[in-house]
Image (cartoon, rainbow, N blue to C red):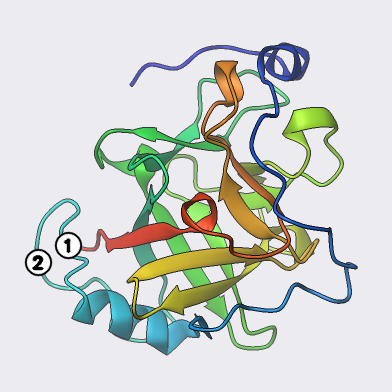
Amino acid sequence: MTSVLVSLSALLAASAMTAPVAGAVPQADRPAAVPGGWEAVDGAELARITGETGALRAPATGERLSASAEEPELMALQSVRNGLFAATELNYGPPSTGVVRARSAAYGGAWEGFAFEWDETTETYAMRSLANNLYVAVEKNYTGSAKNVLRARSAGAGGWERFHVYYNEELGHWALQSTLNGLFVTMENGYTGSLQYVLRARSAEITGAWEEFVFYDIAS
C-alpha cells in the first residue's frame, strides 16, 4: 500500500482548503442539531442496521464476528462524495502519522478497517483503527487546513476520540459527529496534495455527500 512520508508543515503547504464552508461553528457544549430524516444509532442498532442492509459486501459475506452491542463492530467507511474507502495513513511522518483519508478504491484489509466500540455511559462510539490498533482522535489543536483532522493515534478513548453515529434510512447513509467540537465529519474532496480526501470534523450540519458515508460490515 503506497503512501508518502510528509511533515505537518508540508501537509499544510500542499493542501488548499477549497471545500465549501458548511455553516457556523456551534458552541462546544451545544452540538449541531441533527437534520430531519436522521436518527442517532446506539450499539445494538449499528449491528442490526448493517446486518439488514446487506453491508457484508466488504470483503465478502460470512458469519458475524459480534452479535452483541458490547463487542465492537468491524466496519469499512466509504465516502459518498468520492466513492473511496477511508484508510489510516501509517506511512505518513509525525505529527501526521495515522491521518485518516478516503483514498482507497476498495477495501483491502486493516488499512481500511475500523472497530466501532460503543460506550453505554456516554452513549457514544470510539473508532479504533485496525491498521495500528489506535483510536481515532479529532486534532482540535492542529492549525490551518489540518485543524480537526481525524488521526488514529490514541491508546485510549476520551473526549477527543468519541463520536455520535447517525443513520438516514431513506438514503442508507451514515454520518459521524465529534463530541469534542460538536461538528460533523467531512471528507475534504476539495483539498489538494497530501491531505486530499482527509476526514475532518468541521461541518455544523449534514449538508450532503461531503458528510455522508456508506458503512460496510467487514466481520467474517
- In which quadrant of the rendered view does residue 99 lie? top right
Image: 145 above or below 207:
above
In the drawing, what numbered circle is on residue 220? 1
> Dot 2: within a 10 Å radius of its alpha carbon, few (fewer than 14), some, or many (20 or more) residues?
few
The location of residue 42, given as percent across then percent down, is 50, 85
The residue positioned 63% from the left and 13% from the top of the image is 6
| Amino acid marked by disc 2 | Gly
Which residue in the structure is indicated by mark 2?
Answer: 62
Q: Give the camera-side residue of 20 and 105.
A: 20
Quote the CA–CA distance across marks 2 and 1.
5 Å
Task: Tell me the element at label 1.
Answer: loop
Q: Give the camera-side residue of 101 and 74.
A: 101
The answer to the question of whether label 2 and label 1 lie on touching residues, with beta carbons closer than 8 A, is yes
The residue positioned 85% from the left and 32% from the top of the image is 143
The location of residue 10, given as percent across then percent down, is 71, 11
Image: 18 above or below 13:
below
Task: Tell me the element at label 2.
Answer: loop
